[in-house]
Amino acid sequence: MLEAGQIAPSRSPWASPIVLSPQKDGSLRFCVDYRKLNASTIRTAYPMPRVDDTLNSLREAKYISTLDLRSGYWQVEIDPDSRDKTAFIAHRGLYEFLVMPFELSNAPATFQRLMDIQHVHDLSIVFDRLTNTGLTLKASKCDFCRRELKYLGHLITADGIKPDPGLVASVQLFPQPTKIKDIQSFLGLTGYYRKFIKDYAKIAEPLISQLRSHQKSNRAMNHIEWSDKCTKAFDELKTALTQAPILQTPNFNEAFILEIDACDYGLGAILIQEYDNQQFVIAYASRTQTAAERNYFPTEKEALAIYWATKHFRPYLEGTMIYMRSNCRALQWLLDTKDSSGRLARWAISLSAFNIVDIKYKPGKINTNCDTVSRYPLPHILPF
């Protein structure tokens, strides 16, 4: 890093500790614990791109190209007046960054702003070249100033977002599954809209259990044990989609509330916003725990739930105020821990990049929304 011109010796009064995180290949990842610096930083809010929208937009593509900036953040120079604040202690002395380190709370917003400025510049070049070469756009395939728009299987309106009625109609026509692949296809189709359906995993549990049983028993793909519970789940998911609520698009001028919960085998999260005396659900999320995670202590599972939920909803949460709600009293410790080693410390460092205002205890009897999500999570075996 020193030879590459990314850091330089420092005499700064600031001094953050470093943490070496083990990677899957046995190597170590260099991290700086900037929790104290991030706590003193004025946060900048900037809209981040939705990862799932970006991926889904490639569905009809025939040719795909991707570009990856090597250590992209490190290609963004830091203002000389701010470099001393990035100083960190190493075994050979004190150093400071000349480029933007990954762990700074405003790094994602800064980098995305740079990408968007470049994107607008690129669009200007495209329009200029279209004009210069005499190429014209097909107006019927372009959308400008529409009050509602179908996009990636969703109908976007002034009131919010809901499933595309045309695709919902195709779900209604889906025949009763007769083999495992049919169940996978149906869950894949309805799962695409699971963020609209409260308790999606709970409703789908009989169908999900068919996939679990098949995976464990290595049964033939055309063999299923259809039951009345499966029929009920199949019909309820169809009905739920026809009655799916309109989800509010996120208001990045308001704080987010992230309700999280962890049970013995699952993690659950609900992203909410409250303003104008109303509560708006942005999305639901859940997943099962790995075999190793199921051996964690309850406090570790709750910490894992926060770590996972913030990663899952990262496009919404970066640069905004976040209020955590959990049924575990001990989670404030995660933000205050002085331990600089182990997975809890690594999670704490990751969380320090978010503007978590506080974590409040919400008993399970009150936190029923999220508690249900975690106890009926989507298993890893599903194709989505």
Image (tube, rainbow, N blue to C red):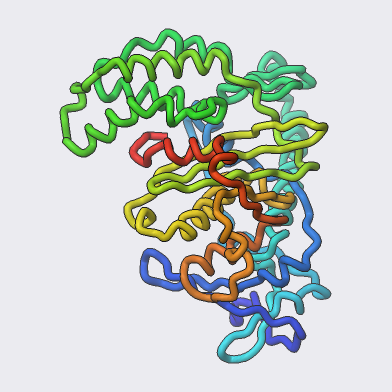
Marks counted in the figure total: 0
Residue at x-position 58% and y-position 57%: 329
**Which quadrant: the C terminus?**
top left
Residue at x-position 79% and y-position 21%: 145
Residue at x-position 76% and y-position 85%: 12
Q: Position of residue 232 (x, y in %)?
A: 37, 16
Q: Quadrant of residue 217?
A: top left
Q: Quadrant of residue 37?
A: bottom right
**Which quadrant: the N terminus?**
bottom right
Observer-nearest of 259 and 321: 259
Q: Does any portion of residue 167 appear in the rendered image?
A: no
Observer-nearest of 348 and 37: 348
Residue at x-position 54% and y-position 11%: 166
In the image, taking residue 257 as reference, residue 215 lies left or right, namely left
* Residue at far bottom of view: 92
Q: Answer above or below: position of 181 versus 315.
A: above
Observer-nearest of 306 and 57: 306
Observer-nearest of 359 and 247: 359
Q: Position of residue 154 (x, y in %)?
A: 60, 22
Q: Position of residue 99 (x, y in %)?
A: 69, 70
Q: Does any portion of residue 330 appear in the rendered image?
A: yes
Q: Answer above or below: position of 312 versus 226.
A: below
Q: Position of residue 87 (x, y in %)?
A: 69, 80
